[in-house]
Image (cartoon, rainbow, N blue to C red):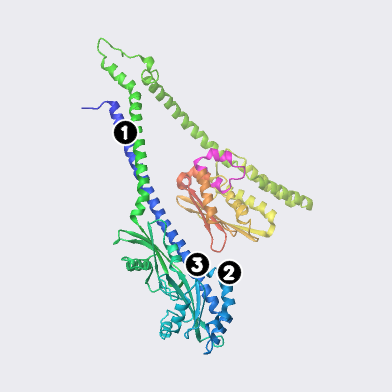
Amino acid sequence: MQLPFQKKLFLTISVFIVGLMLVCISAFSIFTYKNLYQQSIQSLNQLSERTGSELQTLFADMDDLALYASTNPEIRSAFTNAKAESYTDSDLSKETVQTLTSISIPNSSSHYRISLYNKRGIFTSIGIPYNKKLTADKLSSPDFPLWYETLPVERGCASFSEFHPDFWSGSNTLYISLFREIFDKSFSANATALIEIQCPYSKVQTILNFHSGNYSGYLYNKNGALIYPTSPQELSSSLYEASKEASQGYLPNHSRLFYSSTDILHGFRIVLVQSEKHIWQIILPQILTILFMGLTALFFCIVVLFYVTKRATRPLRDLTASVKQVSYSNLSLELEFSDYPDEISSLNEAFEKMFYRLRQSMDEVVKMQACEMRANMVALQAQMDPHFLYNTLTVIKALSREGNTRQISLTCNYLVRMLRYISAYDEHSTSLKQELSHTENYLNLMKIRYEDQFTYSFSIDSTVETANLMLPKLTLQPLVENCFQHGFKSVAPPWNIRIRFWLEAPHWFVSVTDNGAGISPEKKQELLSKISEFLSHPSDSILSMKIGGMGLINTVARLQLKYKDQISFEIVNLPEGGTSIILGGILEDEYLCD
């Protein structure tokens, strides 16, 4: 059963709109997913870098304190003196208290504990309080020298321990310690004591314990051992190995945990982990919102479309019903045409009038195009650079002051010949002989102006019949003029122009080569674009461009208007410097027949 026109129209447009909306919703949802997903990964990377920076600052502060104290002359001198058997803790405190105080106050070292001690048990400390009795017992213990030797100290550099219970208070509070050796004042190769900077676990925990439970932080030392958290973790080893291969990625065997790692001082590495579930918690609500809004918009579009198609097809439905009532006895449409003055009653008449006007318009367009083409050719040929005339008149003025009547006569003679040649607007083609003569007149004028600053030469193949070979008028001289306007502008004389003309049947070619500045790729592309734009809208381009502003564009445009796509045009930068412009066109049939 064939569907009515209204239903077919409604279903067709509905299917198109539904398909388009679904594609748009899907594309936008995918874009939103990728964008939010990337933002989540970027946020994790930024959080990793910020956390790493905070930890690096913390460890750098500890190292700065240790380095300053371990290299301080008073502290080194004090431990040199501590070699004596009679030296006590109180002696060490007296000698170092001023230095340690100067370190403590500006660096806020009260957040840390700074402890100085040697293998004999000579000890002093500042910062976080310690248990003096416990410390004294530990220092006097026979096991202390052995414990001292087991500390993770690296010669000549800072070294960190893992988190450990407090050495000097006996509490269960965990600390991470940084050690540096203190060397003898008179013999710098001999380590006499240690400085230990202790940082509480809570400071590291503050940095790595995020308010959101969606992130987890892990801290590894340079050996790959897990420092934080202190309790063993199932994925710690696989996470560290993965972070060594790439600074970010995911762990497919652990519910697709995404991680981002950052290396900090002394070989420490911080790795932050985020679950894919957390990412979906961010993305899914927005995707659902997009889907809901898209489906709602789709529903309203379908409703509006139904009423629009119903109203738009009403005249056709009424006309169809009326046509079905036509019979032999009733040869008229039972339809009130006043309800549809522009839709039904005028349809056939409008088409007849339209085709009639279309045939007239096509004939007029053909005539107009022919006239426009001829007008464009005449306008292009009429272009002449006024600056050239001004400069020539200026030369004549200078010669008159010098009383050089012979040169004035020659200059006027060459100029008159050029103007007579250019002003013959009804001649669009000329012989190569006349074109060469016109070009030589121009060069002679320039020779009078620049005297011995430039030379020129012509090279015409012996097979060329200059009197019979026809080509578009003003083809050669604009190419030569281009050398002075552009090629020689930024190059000091002497200048040289070489003009060559040859045949490669059925084409003719001319090249103009100078020793000027050359042409940059950008300028060459700009020139080609202008030529293309000119050919697309020749009339507008002629009106918009100033007189004398055409130059090379003028010449190429006229050749392309005459020869269409059968012209040759090339601009070449020469290795030794300068530019060569090559133009070519089709030989006239009369010349080929001869």
Q: Residue farthest to the left?
A: 1
Q: Which mark is in front, 1 or 3?
A: 3
Residue segment shown in magenta = 534-555
Q: Helix, strand, or loop for circle 1?
A: helix
What residue is shown with label 3? 57
Q: How far apart are marks 2 and 1 (CA)?
A: 75 Å
Of the residues under marks 1 and 3, which one precedes in the sequence? 1
Q: Which of 50 and 367 is in front in this view?
A: 50
Compared to residue 159, the image places residue 345 above or below, namely above
Q: Distance between the residues labelled 1 and 3?
A: 63 Å
Q: Which amino acid does label 1 sit on?
A: Ser
Q: Helix, strand, or loop for circle 3?
A: helix
Q: What residue type is labelled 3?
A: Thr
Label 2 crowd (10 A; few <14 / some 14-19 / many >=20):
few
Of the residues under marks 2 and 1, which one precedes in the sequence? 1
What residue is shown with label 1? 14
Compared to residue 18, the image places residue 550 above or below, namely below
Specify the label residue 106 is tagged with: 2
Tell me whether the residue at label 2 lies in contact with that at label 1, contact meaning CB atoms closer than 8 angstroms. no
Residue 468 seen: no
Q: Is the magenta stretch mostly helix, strand or loop?
A: helix
Q: Position of residue 479 (x, y in %)?
A: 57, 51
Tell me the quarter of the picture where residue 252 sits: bottom left
Q: Nearer the viewer, residue 382 or 224?
A: 224
